[in-house]
Amino acid sequence: MKKFNLVAATTILSVMVSGVATADSIRFWTTENQPERLAKQQAMADDFKKRTGHTVEVIPVEEKDLGTRATAAFAAGDLPDVIYHTLQYVLPWAEAGILDVEANDDVVDALQTNTFAPGAISMAQFDGMTAAVPVDGWTQMVVYRKDLFDAAGLAAPTSYAAIEAALDALHNPPSMYGFVAATKVDENFMSQVLEHVFLANGVSPVSADGFAPFDLTATTEVLDFYKKLAKASPPGELFWKQSREMYFAGKAAMIIWSPFILDELAGLRDSAPPTINSDPTSPELASKTAVVTTFGGPSNAAGAAWADIRYFGITSDANTDVAAEFVTYSMKDGYTATLSIAPEGKFPVRRGEPTDTARYVKAWSKLPVGVDRKAPLSDFYSASTINRIVGGLETADRWGVKEGQLSLASKIINSQAINRIVRQYIDDEIDAAAAVAKMNAELAAVE
């Protein structure tokens, strides 16, 4: 593969090339297939054509079909030039030869690796190269009532200990619950929350060799912590719906949620209004809210953030030079437009440029979010909160990524055995040692 040159690409992107270079056409698969999002991507393709003369055919693909379609296209020698895809495909596609790992690594190097969030880079490492280009992502958050924390003199919930101290101080049911923990075992929400809590204490069920039994001491710390969260929660089978409703009603001090709650908190979505007062469009609750993305447990003080990262993958069938130009445009001159496709769930994994290191974070914070009303997040949340929202990508992690066992980790999560056994422990049906032994026995059988 010819080495990609950013200087040459930048020159190409800065001038009209009609009559100067041969115009080519490339195909771009995207899972951002909602009409409004497709329109924004088409506008980017049109802008890219004006700059370079090259045509980009924007092709929507259902996310659930992406794996099978890519495999079939690879077998037929008919892959698109660039694919926008989730983290789960990066390493398997690199191993299978679907991705042109060297081309993607060249683009990252040319854009300068240190301008990207380290977590997004580390999760895409393959044979010493970055196998796909990190585009955007979001991190799960501890959403908390900063006004109540400040009034009680509490530290931000950045650790198991700080969260437990807040539970002790603020839990006062039924007017205020300390937390709303996910307890409905057949909901993916519980799986997602639990993975974050386990990661925070450095506990994972996989190693480079496959399944890795949970350590008794560290896992007992996780179980005891989660039981305390559950005991400070309302009764019942709880998942995302109840946690949002309780927090929006002003009856929960903390919840764990995705960033898609941020516009709702600010009263910008009629289908999920804050009910803390009589005005469903009020930004009052947002003004009282702060977030933490990274928290740690006693066995992992540095902590971790659970993140969902998306990537651009230049494929092995690509017109490499033009594909690299398009990805570079989408991550440089067009990066703010890339983030604007859905800014509430597209945190910038590329912070800025070497001469303006926060350029894209600042631009992202000013992009309008919301459904029924639109406004930038910076209208409702402080600069420090904005930085924490994005900062989770620094320590972004998922089970099985660095170990090369994402497929096994996904099967373990999808078995819901962890959910079920944690719930048995929460309900005092088994003790910690029995819970750890039972999880290890059941997870060892997952293939």
Image: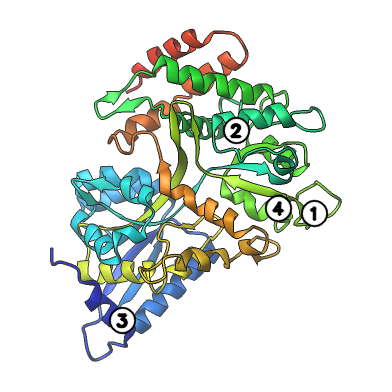
- The circle drawn on residue 52 is 3
- The circle drawn on residue 286 is 4
**Nearer the observer, 293 or 66:** 293
**Nearer the observer, 76 or 336:** 336
Q: Are marks 4 and 1 in contact (CB under 8 Å)?
A: no
In front: mark 1 or mark 3? 1
Q: Are marks 4 and 3 in contact (CB under 8 Å)?
A: no
Left or right? Give the position of 96 relative to 434: left
- N-terminal of the pair, mark 2 or mark 3, is 3
* Vertical arrangement, residue 312 with respect to residue 248, above or below: below
How far separated are the C-alphas under marks 2 and 1? Answer: 31 Å
Amino acid identity at mark 2: Ala
Q: Is residue 23 visible?
A: yes
- The circle drawn on residue 280 is 1
Amino acid identity at mark 3: Thr
Q: Residue 82 in the image: state x and y as whole percent.
A: 30, 61
Amino acid identity at mark 1: Pro
Q: Is residue 179 visible?
A: no
- N-terminal of the pair, mark 2 or mark 4, is 2
Q: Residue 406 in the image: state x and y as whole percent.
A: 33, 35
The residue tagged with tag 1: helix, strand or loop? Answer: loop
How far separated are the C-alphas under marks 2 and 3? Answer: 53 Å
* Vertical arrangement, residue 424 with respect to residue 377, above or below: above
Determine which quarter of the picture holds residue 161: top right
* Vertical arrangement, residue 397 with respect to residue 263, above or below: above
Amino acid identity at mark 4: Ala
How far separated are the C-alphas under marks 2 and 4? Answer: 22 Å
Mark 4, Cα crowd under 10 Å, few <14 / some 14-19 / many 20+, is: many
The residue tagged with tag 2: helix, strand or loop? Answer: helix
Q: Which residue is mark 2?
A: 162
